[in-house]
Image: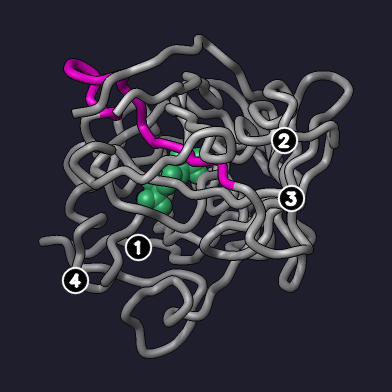
Amino acid sequence: MRLRFTKMHGLGNDFVVLDGVGQAVELTPAQLRYLADRHFGVGCDQILLVEKAGRPDVDFRYRIFNADGGEVQQCGNGARCFVRFVHDKGLTSKREIRVETASGVIVPRLEADGQVTVDMGPPRFEPADIPFVADARAVTYVLDIGQPVELSALSMGNPHAVLETCNVDTAPVAEWGPLIEHHVRFPERVNVGFMQLVHRRAIKLRVFERGSGETLACGTGACAAAVAGMQRGLLEREVEVQTRGGRLTIRWDGEGHSVFMTGPAVTVFQGEIDIP
Ligand SMILES: N[C@H](CCC[C@H](N)C(=O)O)C(=O)O
């Protein structure tokens, strides 16, 4: 099967973006893994599939697949690339679009300065909504990974665990990331964020992503870390999140409100690939 694709990234979290409107796209997990493979395929953290709307109140449908071939509910850096892609491809003339995802509707908007702001919807904290095994909702939980670790757990449509660290550069991302990702108390696995407080309006963040490993940035992870920090009383309502790939701005006005994320979206190249 020959596929046209566009390579994009949001702060170095990179994507193969497929137009499922102009070309029929149905890929098996093995084909998705091939596309994502950095030696034998194109290479990316996630594959983003653009589809036409399945309901009248949205403009497009957005499907997300991790490098391991698994389909997931949400991708924040990908949402910024999504609106850049559909606008640049002439699939819409709107600068603000409503996009259906597996976890609800998000609203990305192309800003005049070239940045993209996304209404990511509200965070969810009930353990069953994350999902996370816990007797009751709490601000932080203790997880046994051979030693007790304290973490926040919440959903941005996809599951996130957030730990506080005194230094992101020396945090045990590679060691603890997989242990927490695959922990039995996260039945759908989990994205694992390591957050260092810089001051009340800024954090540093590294994320070991479910299904992809550590990425240079994670949009939903930045939202989850900022919200966790606010819930712990450590952060103000607008936070700069410093990731290895660059900076995002996150704003959240509290429970019942959407999380807003602002950052860049970059097109790197276009190509075609024959998928076995
Ligand atoms: N690994 C995530 C999906 C991609 C999220 C990330 N790339 C973002 O920008 O939000 C998951 O399994 O839920």
Q: Is residue 196 visible?
A: no
> Hey, which residue is sitting farthest bottom in the picture?
135
Element on which disc 2 rests: strand
Q: Is residue 94 visible?
A: yes
Element on which disc 1 rests: strand
- Residue 36 painted magenta: yes
> Hey, which residue is sitting farthest right in the picture?
112
Residue 229, x across and y down, in percent = 58, 54
Mark in front: 1 vs 2 = 2
Q: Quadrant of the N terminus?
A: top left
Say if mark 3 contacts mark 1, CB within 8 Å: no
Counting the numbered discs, the total is 4
Could you tell me the amino acid type at mark 2?
Answer: Thr
User: Which residue is pictured at 48% across the width and 32% down the height?
Assistant: 18
Which range is magenta? 35-51
Say few, some or many: other residues with alpha carbon within 10 Å of mark 4 (under 14 / 14 to 19 / 20 or more).
Answer: few
The residue under label 3 is 59
Q: Of the residues under marks 3 and 1, which one precedes in the sequence?
A: 3
The residue under label 1 is 150
Residue 174, x across and y down, in percent = 21, 37
Marker disc for residue 262? 2
Disc 4 versus disc 1: distance between alpha carbons? Answer: 16 Å
- Residue 5 painted magenta: no
